[in-house]
Amino acid sequence: MQLPQIRLQSTMAKIAIETVPAKLEIQQPPAELEIEQSPARLTIRTTPSKLTIDQTKAWEDMNLEHIFRRIEKFAEQGYNDWLDGLARVSRQGDELMRIEDGGNPIAEQAKENSETPMYEFNIGWVPSPFSVHISYTPADVDIRFETHKPVIRARTHPPVIRYTPGEVAIRLAQRPSLDIDFAHLRFVGVHFDMLI
């Protein structure tokens, strides 16, 4: 027995998607940098040291002083001796003027004027200690410096960006279809019968 049949055959739709990826390119130009550095200024001022050695007293101790100093010394000694002699003569004159007060001033003055004075001398050093005078003034160094700040000029460049957007292409790769087929199907009408 043949049963009527309706046969359906379908084909699914297919979608094709094609993509082109996006591209991003970034270039960074280097910055331009200029640096100017003025040299520092250094000033050094030096006052030289001074050493003074005075040997005048040492030369005098060795009896080797300068002729001007020797003349001055002898003149001073002669003046002092003259003053001492003047004082002695005045004193002795006063003693003789008061001879009536007693004593024996003539004999005492004769003895005083005839005897040479006794000079005391102990150990001596030629030249005498500390007869050389030394004075020293140290040097003075004045250091001054002046610095200058660097002058920096920087010029930046923005990055160069190139962007290519991506693309998406969508298309129908296969259309859908539906096939309908009938088998053993009969149409029965009022007065007729028909095989479809």
Image (cartoon, rainbow, N blue to C red):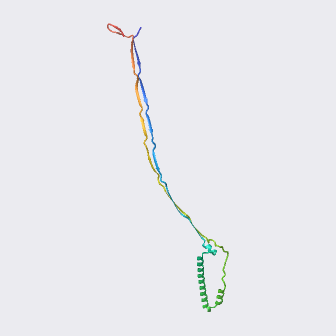
**186 relative position to 139: left or right:** left
Residue 27 occupies which quadrant of the picture?
Answer: top left
**35 relative position to 66: left or right:** left
Task: Report the residue at 59% width, 78% height from top.
Answer: 71
Q: Which quadrant of the rendered structure holds the N terminus?
A: top left
Tally of marks = 0
Task: Report the residue at 39% width, 19% height from top.
Answer: 177
86 to 147, vertically: above or below:
below
Q: Nearer the viewer, residue 101 or 63?
A: 63
**189 relative position to 15: left or right:** left
Residue 123 at what x, y percent from top left?
Answer: 67, 75
Residue 114 occupies which quadrant of the picture?
Answer: bottom right
Residue 119 at what x, y percent from top left?
Answer: 66, 80
Q: Residue most toward the bottom? A: 100
Q: Nearer the viewer, residue 159 or 171?
A: 159
Task: Report the residue at 40% width, 25% height from top.
Answer: 171
Q: Residue most toward the top? A: 191
66 to 174, vertically: above or below:
below
Q: Residue most toward the front? A: 67
Residue 48 at what x, y percent from top left?
Answer: 55, 64
Residue 23 at what x, y percent from top left?
Answer: 44, 34
Q: Residue most toward the left? A: 190
Task: Report the residue at 39% width, 18% height from top.
Answer: 178
Q: Which quadrant of the rendered structure holds the C terminus?
A: top left
79 to 8, vertically: above or below:
below
83 to 15, vertically: above or below:
below
Residue 117 occupies which quadrant of the picture?
Answer: bottom right
**112 relative position to 49: left or right:** right
